[in-house]
Structures are given as structure tokens and as C-alpha cells.
Amino acid sequence: MGLLDGKVILVTGAARGIGREIAISAAREGARLVVNDLGGSVKGGDLGDAEPAQETVDLIRGAGGEAVADSHSVADRHGAEAMVELALDTFGGLHAVINPAGILRDKMFHKMDDSDWSAVIDVHLNGSYNVARAAINHFRDQEDGAFVFFGSTSGLIGNLGQANYAAAKMGIAGLSRIIAMEGAQKNVRSNVIAPFAWTRMIATIPVKDEASAERVRRMQEGMRADQVAQPVVALVSDAAKHVSGQIFAVRGNEIFLMSQPRPVRGMARLEGWTPQSVVDHALPALAGSFEDLGATNSVFTWEPV
């Protein structure tokens, strides 16, 4: 008996990296899988190729599981609808959507092209919308369903050269939150995973010095994609039906519940504020609670466990 016996699950971006490990782990727990992957490069923009997704399907079937391949793009609304239809036609149901599909177009913001911005927003944010919108009414009608979207500490904390990626990932956090709130009465859940793992996307980060080379080595050895897959699979199981609207970071063998924006400190002025009084009183009083401009590695300063 597995945690996902009887479940049908759609996993996007499942030909490689985190997506593939999630699909394999979910199948091991008894789920039947729609394995989606466009088959493109890490920068996106390629035509669909079914072979990479089929490779994951073959691995699952070889281990005794059930899976079918799909090569539509999450950035295409009709493609997302086709994924859901494939699940319903092939397996007679759909119980969870897991959406790690993504691309990178890293560039400092003052050098970023419109195409770099649009491509990342289309795949990450619009892609999350597309797969969620395609599945939401089915989940509401059956009063059961789970989404796991993929965020990033690039959005939650920040990393240089990833304005497009960070904006998309923070948008996904907001999308997931509202889906969770609106779905609560229909047993539709939604959570976000912000993963640390060595993948094709991470491999595109330039190695410019010895320090960054050492950081890459640590990521390869201590932050594997299969480690991210385990909490993702747990979140779509019936055992986690009480968990919704949360953001988790996963790094190696560590799982973190991340904070969500709430008031930190406030000030009121009965006579109202002027620009000068804000400068003289409000900003100095609040300054002690300001967040610094440190990147992700300034927050996660210790080695992965």
C-alpha cells in the first residue's frame, strides 16, 4: 500500500530533474501519472518533443507503474487543458496537479530584454495559471484535489539577475494562496514548494570564481532533486488534507515552513502624515525592522543537512 494508491496525478516538466523525481516517487507510492514535458531546452522556446517525457514513462512502467506521456507546453492554455483531458480519458480521473515546469532567462534587470521577461512569466506564472485553471472545476466538482506549485527563494528572498524569475515566483505564491482560500470549502488544496536542488536550470548559473565553484559542488552533492520530491508527494496525499495555503522550502534533508507577509511594525499619527514627518519620524522608527538586501545565501548560511 502506498500513500497515493488510487490517485491520478499530472506532473509537468517531468522529463528531467525535480519533475522526473516527483513522477517516479509518486508512481512508487501507487499513483498513475500523466508525465508532461515540452522536451525543450532550459531556456524554453523549442517545439514539443515527446521523447523526454516518454523516457520517464518508460522508467515508471519498467518498475510496474502506470503512466502516459504528454508534450504540450504549460504556457499554452489549450495544451494545459489537453493534459487534464488526457488524465481523464486514460485513467478516468485526476486528483492532483504538480507543476515544476520552468525555464531560466537570467540577466541583470537593466540589461533584460522584453523577450526574456515575457518567456519566464509565460512559463512560470501563466503556466501555473493555465494548469490550475484547466483542473480547478474538476477538483471542485469532485470536492477533492491538490495543487503543488513551485516557487523560489529568488522571489521570497532574492537573487541577482533573476528579476523575471523572482516576479513570476512571487506571483505564484499569491495565486496559490487564493486558490487555497477559495477552495477550502470544496476540499481543494494548494501549496508552494521553493526547492533547492541541482537541476539543468541551476547548471546554467555562471561559475565565475572559486567560491561559486564550491557552491555549485555543494549543491550537486547535498541538494538532490529526489530529496525535493519526497515532501511534494506527501503534500498531495490524503494524509496531508489539512495542509493548504502554505509555502515550504526544501533543501537537502531540510524542510522549512516559510513566513508569509504580515505586518512587522506600525506607526500612526493622529494629525496625519506629511512627507516631512514621514522622513523625520516614521522611517527612522521603522528602520530597525527593515529587511536587508542580502541574497538567498545570506539567509541560508549553513551547509545543507
Image (spheres, helix red, strand yellow):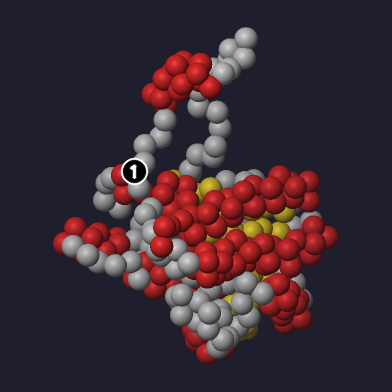
Residue 42 to residue 280: above or below: below
* Residue to which mark 1 is pinned: 294
Residue 45 to residue 196: above or below: below
Given residues 95 and 70, the one toward you in this image is 70
Residue at figure coordinates x 43%, y 53% from the top left: 154
| Mark 1: secondary structure | loop
The spot of residue 13 in percent (x, y) is 53, 73
The spot of residue 209 in percent (x, y) is 18, 62
Q: Residue furthest top?
A: 271
The spot of residue 166 in percent (x, y) is 48, 55
Given residues 26 and 52, the one toward you in this image is 52
At label 1, the amino acid type is: Gly
Given residues 288 and 254, the one toward you in this image is 288
The spot of residue 67 in percent (x, y) is 61, 81
Res 149 quadrant in image: bottom right
Res 168 quadrant in image: bottom right
